[in-house]
Image (spheres, rainbow, N blue to C red):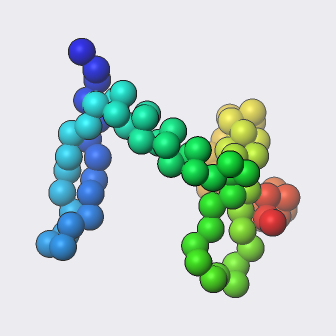
């Protein structure tokens, strides 16, 4: 049987916890990831630089750090 994961969902009345199978979660994440072939995720018409997420996450994984541990100079290499 698949491992179950607890997921927070936003509702009109606040947040609720929903249990999802690990298989379903991976499938949904893959579907979302496939929608962004170049790995760039942005929000509408923001004036902020766009971040190249896939390369940034690979960089962090190689160095064994999390994105919040990146220096401002390291962040700049992932701006588009």
Residue 60 percent coordinates (x, y): 70, 42
Residue 49 percent coordinates (x, y): 74, 73
Q: Is residue 7 above or below residue 1?
A: below
Task: Report if residue 2 is visible in the image.
Answer: yes
Task: Report if residue 71 is visible in the image.
Answer: no
Q: In this view, does 75 lie to the left or right of 20?
A: right
Q: In this view, does 80 lie to the left or right of 13?
A: right
Residue 32 percent coordinates (x, y): 50, 48
Q: Is residue 68 left or right of residue 63?
A: left
Return the residue found at the far top.
1
Give the residue at x 20% y 46%. Answer: 18
The quadrant the N terminus occupies is: top left
- In which image quadrant can residue 80 be found? bottom right
- In which image quadrant can residue 62 be found? top right
Front residue of 79/34: it is: 34
Give the residue at x 21% y 39%. Answer: 19
What count of labels does the image hold?
0
Front residue of 44/4: it is: 44
Q: Is residue 50 above or below residue 75?
A: below
Q: In this view, does 48 lie above or below 8?
A: below
Residue 6 percent coordinates (x, y): 26, 41
Give the residue at x 68% y 36%. Answer: 61
Return the residue found at the far left.
13
């Amino acid at each position: 049987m698949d491992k179950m994961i607890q997921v927070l969902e936003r509702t009109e009345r606040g947040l609720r916890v929903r249990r999802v199978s690990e298989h379903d979660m991976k499938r949904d994440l893959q579907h979302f990831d496939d929608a962004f072939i170049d790995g760039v995720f942005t929000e509408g018409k923001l004036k902020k630089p766009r971040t190249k997420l896939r390369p940034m996450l690979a960089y962090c994984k190689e160095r064994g750090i999390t994105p919040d541990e990146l220096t401002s100079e390291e962040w700049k290499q992932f701006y588009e």
